Amino acid sequence: MSFTTITFLAWLALVVLLYYRVPPARRWWVILAANIWFYLSLDTKGILALAAASALSWYAALRIGRLQTMAADWKRAHKALPKEERRTGLAVYEKREKRWVALATLAALGVLFLVKYYGEMAQSLNRAAGLSLWRAENLLIPLGISYYSFFLISYVIDVYRTVIEPEKNVLRVFCFAGFFLSITQGPFGRYGELMPQIDESPAFSWQRFWRGAKRMAWGYFMKMAVADRAAIITAYAFQDPMRCTGAQLAFAMACFGVQLYTDFCGYSHIMLGAGEILGLKLPENFRQPFFSHNMSEFWNRWHITLGAWLKDYVFYPVLQSAPMKALGTALKPKLGKKNAAQVQTYLALLILWFSIGLWHGAGFNYVFGVGLLQFCYIASGMLCAPLLKKANEVLHTEKFPLVWRIWQGIRCTLLMIFAWVFFQADSFGEALVFLRRMLTGFTLRDLNLGSLTAMGVNRMGLLMLFYGVLLVFLVDLAHEKGLSLRDSLQKLPLLPKVCCYQLAMWSMVMLGIFLSSGTGTFLYARF
Amino acid sequence: MERSEVFERLNQVFREVFDDDAITVTEETTAADVAGWDSLMHITLIAEVEEEFDMKFPMKSVVSMKNVGDMVDVILEADE
């Protein structure tokens, strides 16, 4: 059941109806049923893997909770002991808790590695070293495994960190892991934020319904009118870069940036809008990323929940780990405190970005394009910060702030659309072919209407694409200025409000590519 | 250890980490109030505070601390 179908909307309406018919304390049952129905509509076999993963995480969390209770009892009974002896006594429980965290985490990551990464690695090894390793060709990839594995890891770790109590009912953990509004493409939610919201969700409200519906409509516009149209151009170029001129490839590279943003952000709007209808505030995944001042800020505004997840469960734990602290101790006498801390930070960042690249896929194009290259962007920004500050002083950028601001946004955009060539290409080698052709075959003369309309979209289609991109830009600009367009629309008098809704409806009807000619699938669902 | 003593020592740590002798932290001080206190500097700050007070912040606190007041609570709890 794809999100861009009338079937999904009708099904969602049914879910909303049932959801509000039951008392808040029972609404999670409706969500659980919806999750199962939704999952089975897309993957009939993978649900067993999801259920097994949920059960293991639930059990591990229960054991951790039990150990924490035992530790607290021991601490109370031995209050009179000196601090060091108390620490030693408690360390025994801590060690056992960590074993359960390790078991649950390794099990989740192990399965993820097996179904998503092992096959490709085995194939590469077989080719490179002449081996005959099992390639796991017949292993199915359960729907959403890249997402629910991380959801469940965060659940177990949050219990270990005493952020939440362990859940006694395994079905509630299953409900969280398989939540239909995040299992295919995120956002990365936390157990302690989602389930209490469902349990305490408010009564139905038409105001909330229309706010959510408006947000969903905007998401559908981004996906169907902009992303799916840009996708035609990028597909044409990436299928066979050698049939395109450099100018066409440059245009396609820009179109892919448009496609990726409007596809993924559009999806987020649809999901968050649906969540709003259900009285749930799901975490934001985008905050006008192309308005960033620099690349560090870009990654605080793009796929926000993945960044937050990795910061809380990878970056900080790596920096706080014993090996990293030992490294700091060894480096301090040689480099000084500040420089030693810098080295530790850069190393942790490298591990973080490698993980982000790897999460997207086993291919080196992912590890490089959305991993190591991003590390280079951010690290060079940090290292060159004093130089850039000096350059700003010399250029007196404070005298033309708007121009400088626009340049900063353009700079981030160019760096990202270049990196995303690696994301979209089938392999690192294919990405290099694309880029080489683009750079060596580029002439301004080729950047004309004739060559652009040869890429699968006619003049009207191009015009509609530009109109769609302009609309998306204007809406993002409004949001960047702190304007809530939905609230502003609500406050309009009746006639202008009706005109706006009519215009929006006709824009959707005229510009949207519906299933007959669009792709219908979302880019981030492939992970 | 008194709360006031913790704040005095924290001021020294903050001034050293952020290279700013004018910093004076209060219960309500957050990352938004200190220039340069981002997610990268946060962990450097945590490491320095741990060294200063010979204690270890639980990871739960590292990720969920909202202000310096929360930080002081954890330091005093570790001292018990």
Image (cartoon, rainbow, N blue to C red):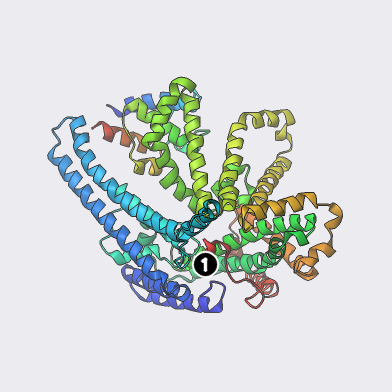
Q: Nearer the viewer, residue A494 or A475?
A: A475
Residue A71 visible in the picture:
yes
What is the x, y in percent for residue A92? 21, 41
Q: Residue furthest top?
A: A333
Residue A188, compared with residue B39, is above or below; it is below
Q: Amino acid at mark 1?
A: Gly
Residue A178 in the image, given as x and y percentages of width and height: 40, 66
Q: Residue at x 28, y 27 (%)?
A: B2
Whether A307 is drawn above or below A176: the answer is: above
Place of residue A281 in the rendered image (x, y in percent of width and height, measured from the top left):
45, 60
Q: Residue at x 69, y 32 (%)?
A: A392
Q: Nearer the viewer, residue A333 or A506?
A: A333
Q: Residue at x 84, y 52 (%)?
A: A443
Q: Secondary structure at mark 1?
A: helix
Report which residue position mark 1 lands on. Answer: A212
Q: Residues within 10 Å of mark 1 (few under 14, many from 20)?
A: many
Q: Residue furthest front?
A: A130
Return the residue nearer the eye: A488 or A83: A83
How many numbered circles are shown? 1
Chain letter behind tag 1: A
